[in-house]
Image: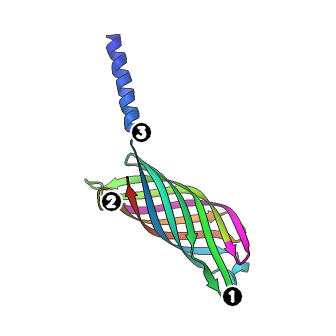
Amino acid sequence: MKKILLLAGVASVVAMSANAANFTPYVGVDYNYSLVHHDASMNNWMSGHANSGSLILGTSFGQYASVEAFYQLSKKEHKADKRSQIQAYGADVLGHLPLGCMGEWELLGSAGTGWYDAKYNKDNDSGWGYRLGAGVQYNFANNWAARAMYRHVWVDKSVLDCMNEFSLGVRYYF
C-alpha cells in the first residue's frame, strides 16, 4: 500500500511539473506612440512625442503569464536643425486574464524595466526606465493575436523624465 501511495505521489508531482512546463514561445512587432516628458532645457532639441517600432521575443507560461524581451527604436525627430532619437531594450512580465468561454479576449497587466538611450545631435543620455502597463489582447486565429497596450515609463535620467506610451501590435505563437 505504501508503494502504491508513493508511486501515485511521484506520478502526480511529475504530472504537475509537466503541466507547469507548458510554455509557448512567440514573436511580435509593435507600433508605439509615446508622449515624451523631458527636461525643459531640451525644448529646442526634443519634441514632445516619438513614433517608434518594437521587436518582441516572448514566452507564455500557460494561459495566465508571459515574459517578453523588447527592442524599441524611434524614428529620428527633427526640430529646427536639431535631431533626436530614443532607443530602448529590456524585459516585461505580463499577467493575462482570459475573458469569455473561448478565451479569445484577454486583459493584460505588465511590469518591467528597460535601458533607455536618448540621443540628441551628438550627445546622449542613458538610464534605466521602469514600466507599468495595461491592455487587451484578441486571439483572432490559432497562432495569431492582436494587442493594444498603454504603458507609463519612469526614466531615471536628466533628459527624459517619463513617457506615456500607446502601442498596437501583433504576436505569432509557435
Q: Position of residue 75 (x, y in %)?
A: 57, 76
Q: Is 127 situated left or right of 172 in this image?
A: right
Query: At 45% across and 65% down in the image, what residue appears?
Result: 29
What residue is disc 2 on?
139
- Marks 1/2 in contact by CB < 8 Å: the verdict is no
Residue at left offset 59%, top offset 70%: 163
- Along the viewing direction, whichever of 20 and 111 lies nearer the viewer: 20
Residue annotated with mark 3: 21
Residue 88: image quadrant is bottom right
Residue 35 in the image, given as x and y percentages of width and height: 56, 75
Which residue is labeled 1 in the image? 81
122 inside magenta stretch: yes
The answer to whether 30 is drawn above or below residue 142 in the figure is: below
N-terminal label among 1 and 2 = 1
Residue, far front: 174
Badge 3 crowding class, 10 Å Cα cut-off, few under 14, some 14 to 19, many 20 or more, is few
The relative height of residue 122 versus residue 117 in the rendered view (above or below) is below
Q: CA distance from mark 3 to mark 1?
A: 53 Å
Dot 3 and dot 1 residues touching (CB under 8 Å)? no
Q: Position of residue 106 (x, y in %)?
A: 36, 57
Q: Position of residue 23 (x, y in %)?
A: 41, 45
Tag 1: Cα neighbours inside 10 Å, few (<14), some, or many (≥20)? Answer: few
Magenta region includes residue 20: no
Q: What amino acid is labelled 1 in the image? A: Asp
| Other residues around mark 2 within 10 Å, as few (<14) / some (14–19) / many (≥20) | some
User: Spatial distance from mark 1 to mark 2, Cα to Cα?
Assistant: 44 Å
Span of residues in magenta: 119-137
Q: Secondary structure at mark 3?
A: loop
